[in-house]
Image: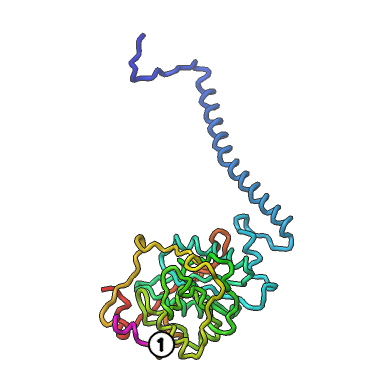
Amino acid sequence: MMYSSRRKPVLYFKEDRRFLSWKCSILKLFGLCLVLVLVPLLWLQLSCSGDMNRATVEDSHLPHQPCSLDRQALVADSPSWGPHKMALLIPFRERFEELLVFVPYMHAFLNKKKIRHKIFVINQVDHFRFNRASLINVGFEESGNDTDYIAMHDVDLLPLNEALDYGFPDQGPFHIASPELHPLYHYKTYVGGILLLTKRHYQMCNGMSNRFWGWGREDDEFYRRLRKAGLELFRPVGITTGYKTFRHIHDPAWRKRDQKRIASQKQEQFKVDAEGGLTNLRYKVESRQDLTISGAPCTIVSVKLECDQNQTPWCLLN
């Protein structure tokens, strides 16, 4: 008999074997499913157990940690590195690709230099325009009593030269990303990018002004605060790598900065905020989460800033 090429012939079995064959097929299917479930679980258990065993042998003096945690993070707060501890403050909003690069890189960089540190990502989650200065003020307030100096650090700026000093700035504010080293900004009064201050010096300045919504000018106003407080500004010496001292990972073509000037913002941005700063900072912490990024620990502080639209109507884009 001829069969159509579009049909597949059905194989028939004798009546006394049909039930047995069907039963065997069910058992085989069940067994296959059981193997598919148990084998990955067994592999995962052995992998983590192996990592834990190696950690126990190599770091027997350290507490047990999950197998995914980089052991380098466990020694990042060694008291033998000195009495001072830095709060690395990152004003942040929606730049996750840069954050995934920055946190592990800076954690390893500071560990190599034996700088005790805690990384704080101050994440703005409200509907207002980005306010870098206010976020740094929040970071200062939320950094805890176990840190005694801060680093105001842009998330898109990575130090490449290991000779850069991130130590305690006891003599005065230390501008690491100085104009002769920063890849983009070269004017003499520039104090942005990366600036170290003791907490006492930051308080002497009353922090940064909260009036700067959108991009730019808050650093220029802070330079005037440093002078008013009578603080001497220091910058690196002996660094020979010039504009290649840092890697700037921000792509302006892909992520444009909010440079719009609204209402009287253009005139107001050049004025000194004599009263504002830490004393009139208003915010609400929405959440606080400790996590690790590629083994590097950090604290994400998500905040909602408050805006007095009578004072700074440019906090909203119209």
The reply to whether residue 233 is visible in this rendering is yes
Please tell me which residue lies in front, 48 or 79.
Answer: 79
Determine whether 290 is above or below 305 in the image.
above
Residue 283 is inside the magenta segment:
no
Judge from the rendering whether residue 14 lies leftward or rightward of residue 85; answer left or right.
left
Estimate the x, y position of residue 240 in percent, counting from the top left: 54, 69
**Figure quadrant of residue 5:** top left
**Figure quadrant of residue 286:** bottom left
Estimate the x, y position of residue 99 in percent, counting from the top left: 47, 63
Q: Residue at x 32, y 72 (%)?
A: 259
In this figure, which residue is indicated by the disc labeled 1?
276
The residue segment tinted magenta is: 266-271
* Image quadrant where one finds the N terminus: top left
* Image quadrant where one finds the C terminus: bottom left
**Figure quadrant of residue 294:** bottom right
Estimate the x, y position of residue 271 in percent, counting from the top left: 35, 87
Please tell me which residue lies in front, 57 or 188.
Answer: 188
Q: Residue at x 35, y 13 (%)?
A: 3
Judge from the rendering whether residue 53 lies leftward or rightward of residue 132; answer left or right.
right
Please tell me which residue lies in front, 41 or 272.
Answer: 272
